[in-house]
Amino acid sequence: MRKTALMLAPALAISLGACSSSTSTPLSTAVSGATRVGSTAGPGPSPSTSATSTSGSASTSSGTSGAATASATSATSVVATGSPSSPVALPTSFTAIDKAIKDPDLGHEIVVARIARNLPWPDGYQASAAAYELVAVEMRWTPGTTFTAPIRLQDFAITTGSASPNRADALVNAALQAAGWALLPAQVPNGQSVTGWVVFRVEPRNAPKMVVDYTRPTSQVTDSGTIFPTQTFGAQIVG
């Protein structure tokens, strides 16, 4: 099946090239920083995490409502270093969510697998720790295969009713990596399916309701000129 090239809105100054119908763009593990994609090394909470190729869109239905499942799974206790003088004790239990976000236009599927709340802050962040909560979210990203549009980290946020969206924060990423937690990359191209963690800085601390929002940017099909406008899809993870 021929894949159609898609470019994001001109305001973003990004365009995506076409790829062949038989070969998907390979996922590079040389992402920015020291982010490790699909790693299984170390004692972290995701021993089965992997990056796999996919030839079609997934069939899981959208899950944008309802309370998060209050079950938890145990994992090996680990201690990693957030900064040279500040050991960070990472969570050893996780709340299962298992909800899917589906973009019906582009065919993207994001599965929110589980979360870990109240990750500890390194020393020196007392003011932030009093106002914000670090929330880790494990997701599986599977971009659709009809268009050459990736799933991008910058398009995710957690909403709580605060004035601004709560974006990803890389403050404790090094500690997570040292403990064997696989992190999601900056983006995943079509033809790949990747599972990993993202940490968000969330306001207020201990919010009673949280929703993972994926905002698809305005996208234009290069062949036909068809435009898919910006749209936000969500999955409630707390409350």
Image (cartoon, helix red, strand yellow):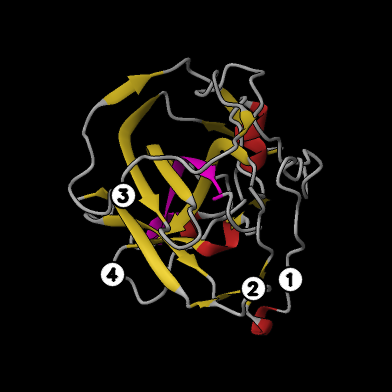
x, y percent for residue 99 = 32, 42
Mark 3 is surrounded, within 10 Å at the Cα level, by few (under 14), some (14 to 19) or many (20 or more) other residues, namely: some
| Among the two numbered marks 3 and 4 on one chain, the one whose residue lies closer to the N terminus | 3
- Where does label 4 land, which residue? 161
Q: What label sits on residue 62 in the rendered view?
A: 3
Q: Amino acid at mark 3?
A: Ser
**82 and 170: which one is in front?**
170
Q: What label sits on residue 154 in the rendered view?
A: none
- Separation of residues labelled 3 and 4 (CA atoms): 22 Å
Res 54 → quadrant: top right
**Farthest front residue?**
1
- Separation of residues labelled 2 and 3 (CA atoms): 23 Å
- Separation of residues labelled 2 and 1 (CA atoms): 6 Å
Is 143 magenta? The answer is: yes
| Among the two numbered marks 2 and 1 on one chain, the one whose residue lies closer to the N terminus | 2
Q: Amino acid at mark 4?
A: Gly
Helix, strand, or loop for circle 2?
strand
- The span shown in magenta is 129-144
Res 34 → quadrant: top right
Q: Nearer the viewer, mark 4 or mark 2?
A: 2
Helix, strand, or loop for circle 1?
loop
